[in-house]
Image (cartoon, helix red, strand yellow):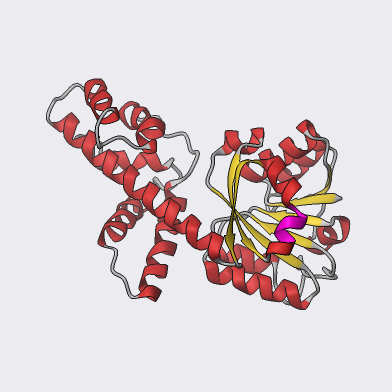
Amino acid sequence: MNLAFVGTGRMGANMARHLKLDLDYTITAVYDINRSCAEELAAEIGAKAFPTLAEVTAAADVIFTVISDDEAMRTIFAPSGDSLLTEAGGKTFLNCATLSPGVHQEVYEAAKSCGADTLEAAMASSISHARNGELYLMIGGEEAVFERHQKLLKDLSLNLRYCGDIGRAAQVKALVNMVMNINTAGLAEGLGLASALGLDLAMVREVFSQTGANSRVLETDAEDMVEREHECWFSAEHAAKDSGIAGALAEQAGLILPVNAATKGQYDRLIAKGLGHLDKSGVAELTFPDRS
């Protein structure tokens, strides 16, 4: 089985490294709009960085896509021109980005018309999990296709959850990131207020950890918020995008989600200040005194 990766940023590259360097899978092709990024990874794992998407499809049986947003997904699966769908019959696409469910459905139908299979493999994990094969993967698509690729997906993951038909994994992932972003923004406000009150922040964090204020975000982001260490693991731009996906789903369902809307507003403010490249913990720059 020859594998390929389209999108060689931090997540895609580290998934490829794990499969090749740790498990000796055959990775024949990589592609990225940042050509030098693809070439560096190709040299490291013994693959070829192809200049066109059609060449990637021709060189592999299973193609992972790890790209940024809906527009990028539509571009790589374009109905004409250079596209992953070129002579894609018999291929399988494993699409790992956080996208709107509608785009996953579009790609599924376009691939199906070409005789190709697709699965969503939505990730709820960080860069280190990608490198170590410890992703949490939410899978959407035809169950028979999932079963056929289950070993490969298990080799990338610590936890694997089949969520249902195409689009379902994207819906679940949107909910995961919506709640994570709300928790992050809430923690930033709690620590920001604690700082304004002159409380000892180490003490406050310890109290939070032992009470109803505890959360996974407290473990991962609290120290970064206090120390202003916002090295990017999951950017504020992506947080705004994903909260927007959840908001669109709520609108389609006829629901009003004011907390999600307020959270997206905070990340939009951060982006407007030119800080969208910061980790989502950077939302604390809006809530701590004397920072914004």
Side of 199 relative to 230 (left or right): left
Most common SS among magenta residues: helix
- Residue 31 versus residue 203 in the image, above or below: below
Looking at the figure, which quarter contains the C terminus?
top left
Considering depth in this image, is 189 or 138 the residue closer to the camera? Answer: 138
Image quarter for residue 60?
Answer: bottom right
Q: Is residue 146 magenta?
A: yes
Q: Is residue 150 above or below residue 17?
A: below
Q: Residue at x 79, y 56 (%)?
A: 62
x%, y% of residue 106? 62, 74
Q: Is residue 219 left or right of residue 161?
A: left
Q: Picture coordinates of residue 6 (x, y %)?
A: 71, 54
Q: Quadrant of residue 209?
A: top left
Can the viewer see residue 235? yes
Q: Is residue 270 left or right of residue 122?
A: left
Q: Residue at x 39, y 37 (%)?
A: 216
Q: Where residue 64 appears, x then y in whole percent?
A: 71, 54
The residue most toward the left is 197
The residue stretch that appears in magenta: 145-149
Q: Is residue 42 above or below residue 176?
A: above
On the image, the x and y values in percent for residue 147 come to 73, 56
Residue at (56, 67) in percent of width and height: 167
The front one of 97 and 67 is: 97
